Amino acid sequence: MIAATGSGGIPHAPYPQDDRRSRSIDDRGVSRRLLAHLVLPLLALAVTVAGPAWSVTPASAAAPTATLSPSSGPAGSSTTLTATGLPRSAAALVTIGLSTLKVRTDRAGRLVTPVAVPALAIGDVRVAVSASGLRMVTRYRVTGRLRFGVSVPGGPGATEQNAEAALALGEVPSIEMFYRPFGSEIATSDLDAAAGRKATPLLTWEPWNPGRGVDQPDYRLSRITAGEDDSYVLRTAQVLRAWGKPVLLRFAHEMNGDWYPWCEQANGNQAGDYAAAWRHVHDLFVSAGAANVAWVWSPNVSYAGSTSLASVYPGDAFVDLVALDGYNWGTTVPWHSWTAAADVFGPTLAELRSIAPRKPLFIAETASTEVGGDKAAWIRNMFTWLSGQPNVEAVVWFDYDKETDWRVNSSSSAAEALRQGLAART
């Protein structure tokens, strides 16, 4: 029993037995006070815990999960997304690249829907599902037979050069790599030309002014991190996002050497500057919503005196694919000798697998000279070696006549060896 009290905490006097009307009125007053002091606080607590009646339907009891079946396969294929633990009977968005599906969860907070993997995708493709503020991301690993690409001097817009390379290879390359320096605008006509040949564009984006050497203070890594180029970077991100199809972006490659302004051994850069600049540029692309861009971290093969690869790796959250550049220089330079592909790439690939064990790998630049050995035999041995490298998913041939004749068709025997190697791959 609760005794009614006055404002001073002293119990009220007993009600007169003969004044029933007065007693009834006072009883009602007590009831109101009990409601105010006991019931209303409980109601307020209930609102605090449960939320108002118009709040989002609570998620189902299952832990949030998102899975794909199958979780790997060729580009252009279809997979099924299953997500659980989402809000019940709620609108949901599923995104893959820049494609978006609008679906609804069922009464158990579950959704099952097919999704199409972009035909030009390579490596890991992000698949995200979101509903009522809850977001989950899973990944589809693009696999299949080894993809082969080329880089020609004129880039994707050089129709004749690309046609000549395709004729020499006996197939249309599925990756087309081209180079652009900071400050230049990315032409969507180049991207369209590559996509028109059903190739994935691979943009090698170089923060320098070509032809002005290694010492270029305007492109010092610390300046990039400080935001000196932010407006240009954001503009480029918006162009690539608007284009909409998959783009491989190889930013500031061969950073472990000393021959580019973005190398930590050059241009006044300091240890740690490279990873910081990479993360800054990457985050600007994320802020611009350029989800169709895959980030390719691409060092040169290690050599005595090269920068430690682990020290310039930006981190798994900032890298989608790991690539590697390496050449057989033969005897064209005094510091080199004829070297098989397994010896060019093997030691550094082992290093990369330890640094980024979950990332897809590919060879972003390679070629062989004719000088000092048998180029056709080198190519045949390269394909034999690649057949034992299951997580090397692509190779890009540097089809230039530059320091030496690196081209596919530098000789008919070299071109034939490449055609045979491509035809035989599984």
Image: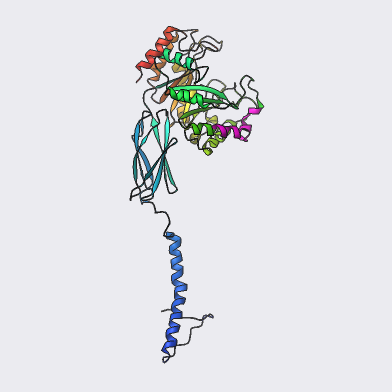
Whether residue 298 is visible here, answered yes or no, is no
Is 227 part of what is drawn in magenta?
Answer: yes
Q: Which residues are magenta?
A: 218-236
Pick the residue in front: 266 or 426. 426
Residue drawn 47% across and 25% down?
192
Quarter of the image for residue 419 reads top left
Q: Quadrant of the N terminus?
A: bottom left
Q: Relative to 408, does residue 60 appear above or below in the rendering?
A: below
Q: Position of residue 137 (x, y in %)?
A: 42, 40
Is any atom of residue 413 visible in this view?
yes
Q: Position of residue 68 (x, y in %)?
A: 35, 37
Q: Nearer the viewer, residue 200 or 228?
A: 200
Q: Main secondary structure of the magenta part?
A: helix
296 w.r.t. 93: above or below: above
Residue 21 spot, x, y in % from top left: 42, 87
Colour treatment of the image: rainbow
Does residue 23 show up magenta in the picture? no
Residue 323, given in percent of the width and then of the height, sits at: 48, 25
Placement of the C terminus among the 4 image quadrants: top left
